[in-house]
Image (cartoon, rainbow, N blue to C red):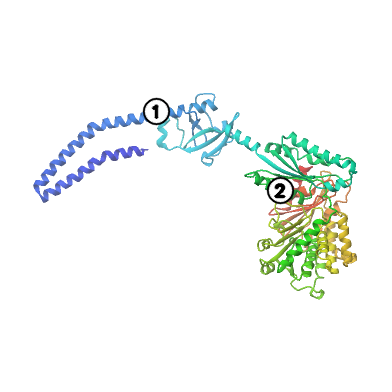
Amino acid sequence: MKSEREKALKTYYHWPFFVGIVILVSAVTGLFLNREVGFWLLGFAALYYLATLVVYLIIRAKLERKIVDFGAGYAQVQNELLRRTSIPFALTDGEGEVLWSNPAFRKAFLKKERPDGKLSRLFPEIGEKSLADQPELHVGFEDRRYVVRCSEVSMDTVEAFNDLTFGGDRGLWLLYFQDETERLYYKKKLEDEAAVLALIYFDNYEDVLSGVESVRRSLLSALLERKLNECVDELHGVLRKLEKDRYFMVLQRQALSVLEERKFSILEEIKRTNIGNDIQITMSIGVGVGGENYDQNFDYARTAIDMALGRGGDQAVVKNREKVSYYGGKAQSTERNTRVKARVKAHALRELIEAKESVMIMGHPISDMDCLGAAMGIYRAAEFSGKQAHVVMGEVSNSVKPILQTFTEGSGYPKDLFLNCEEAKELIEPNTLLVVVDTNRPEYTVCPDLLKMTQSIVVLDHHRQGVETIDNAVVSYVEPFASSASEMVAEIVQYYDEKLKLKPVEADAVYAGIVMDTNNFEDKAGVRTFEAAAYLRRCGADTTRVRKYFRDSMDDYKLRAETVRRAEVYKDDYIISICPSSDKNPNQTIVAAQAANELLEIRGIKASFVLTEYEGKVYISARSIDEVNVQVMMEKLGGGGHLSVAGAQFTGITIEEALEKLKAVIEEGA
């Protein structure tokens, strides 16, 4: 293959002959026009050809010798520079076979003078792939790290490698290795020493102190503060007290890694503090890390502590720029005896409703008793304020239809009380207040598009918050210690206005929501749960009517019995079953939850899981009593819930694949 330089040089040699031809043609033409001028031109052409021939025969050889000498010297200098440079170079074919290397490469990586074998033998990171597919690589050799950059070599430059043995037509690649060991060391050092900001709150400080003798209260406070100081001192951090039950902490990133490795064991140490207190004290930690500056890290810490408290406390939440991590959360949420927060939220909700033209209420896609009960409580509050209100309903199970059919025009309710998603999108306006009940995750709402169509959003929910939440809500009332969204709405209605009273059918719906989520007052039923139930009874709720609403059809009963029959014990402490899928029965998810509750009654079982497939999705209902945190397990599968009641759903996978994912999570937690 001729190089471009050779072509250019030959073109330079040919130009005099091209010019001579032009002169000769001009001379011949001149003979026909003017013989005297023509002869002069012929003479000039003869002299030109003679001079050109002399130059071509005599000077050309000298010129070529000088060019060759210059090229050889240039190649020698280039080759010598490659040999003397301290940067390791290697020439390979397209598959990584070493063809040539400079002394720096052989000194750094080889024990002999001549190259041998493939680069993948020295650097497993390179692998067997073509170098064209990996132009930049990061490899390690012994205790050093290198970044390898690859560039394809033109055939015109091969002459620089005098001792090159070219093997085949696989192409040539020049690799140079840049040592990045020190850069990576200082980068990691900067990352390890980066500031981490954290907020520490005691969840139930006042409640614990109120149950301790006055002479021991100062001792308990001192013990708690000493444990915190000992932990922070060990990590070489700084701890400052903001209030009696709140602290601010500064650590280095490497200290946070230690805390994460220990799973924030300080949470358990605090819970073990006991000097006669009847209530176990718990603590929440919100950590901000990975921000561009201290201000952003502090914002992350505040968001993290809000998430920790919103999930029930007794846990640490680490918020990074890329992700959120959870630790702890094994204790049951502590019920707050004070109703101050409920009263404040009720007043805020009333101000928002009265300032808007209309109210729209929605819950999660497959509406249950709790979702419907909470929605009807908010509906009554909106009607009391003279605002037009609608409830956005998704698919309705057969268990909800009996009570849903009581809200008819004959009972005094508008015909358009219940809307589907499309109808709601046509009616909603920027000045409409959207109230979301029984869920706090955007994708778990009946119509997520409504969240983007109004700026006034209120969230009322009792589920623990996850990474994805409705973050543009003007009022967010999320209380994981509450038994149900219906319980929260019952409290809000009491403080909304003293003249407001639920109708008996509405009280039935709210009461039914509490009964369903507490499993007939067996799970998560606290003092405030019974107080809410007592208020609903005063409003006319009838336990007999509610009981009739919960009666199952024969098909549902058989389906639940078949689900229980299929159950199998897994790892001695867990029980798993699959609820048969049937297009004729839209209550599969409800039946699966009921079966999970029944399976939990088996002696020796710590947690029960029931899977079912419905309309292209796989649902998991998880239940426990107090030994296993199923909420944490379901979060790993993209779901959530409470410590003892949780669930998850999958799209695009089979029920067998979902079962394998569930077993993997159980294995991890076992």
Kindly give the residue lying farthest to the left in the view shown: 36
Crowding around mark 2 (Cα neighbors within 10 Å: few <14, some 14 to 19, many 20+) is many
SS class, disc 2: helix
Query: In the image shown, does 299 or 317 lie closer to the viewer?
Result: 299
Q: Amino acid at mark 1?
A: Gln
- From mark 1 to mark 2, how far is it between C-alphas? 65 Å
Rendered image quadrant of residue 589: bottom right
- Which of disc 2 and disc 1 is earlier in sequence? 1
SS class, disc 1: helix
In percent of width and height, residue 414 lies at 76, 73
In percent of width and height, residue 386 lies at 76, 71
In percent of width and height, residue 346 lies at 79, 61
Q: Amino acid at mark 2?
A: Arg
In the rendering, which numbered label is found on residue 302? 2
Q: Residue at x 32, y 39 (%)?
A: 7
Q: Is residue 394 visible?
A: no
Kindly give the residue lying farthest to the top in the view shown: 112
Taking the image as shown, residue 494 lies to the left or right of residue 27, namely right
* Residue 103 drawn above or below residue 172: above
Q: Is residue 545 visible?
A: yes
Q: Quadrant of the C terminus?
A: top right
- Please give the residue where the numbered disc 1 appears in the rendered image: 76
How many numbered discs sit on the rendered protein? 2
Taking the image as shown, residue 497 lies to the left or right of residue 87, namely right
Q: Residue at x 20, y 44 (%)?
A: 21
Q: Quadrant of the N terminus?
A: top left
* Residue 98 drawn above or below residue 566: above
In percent of width and height, residue 22 lies at 20, 46
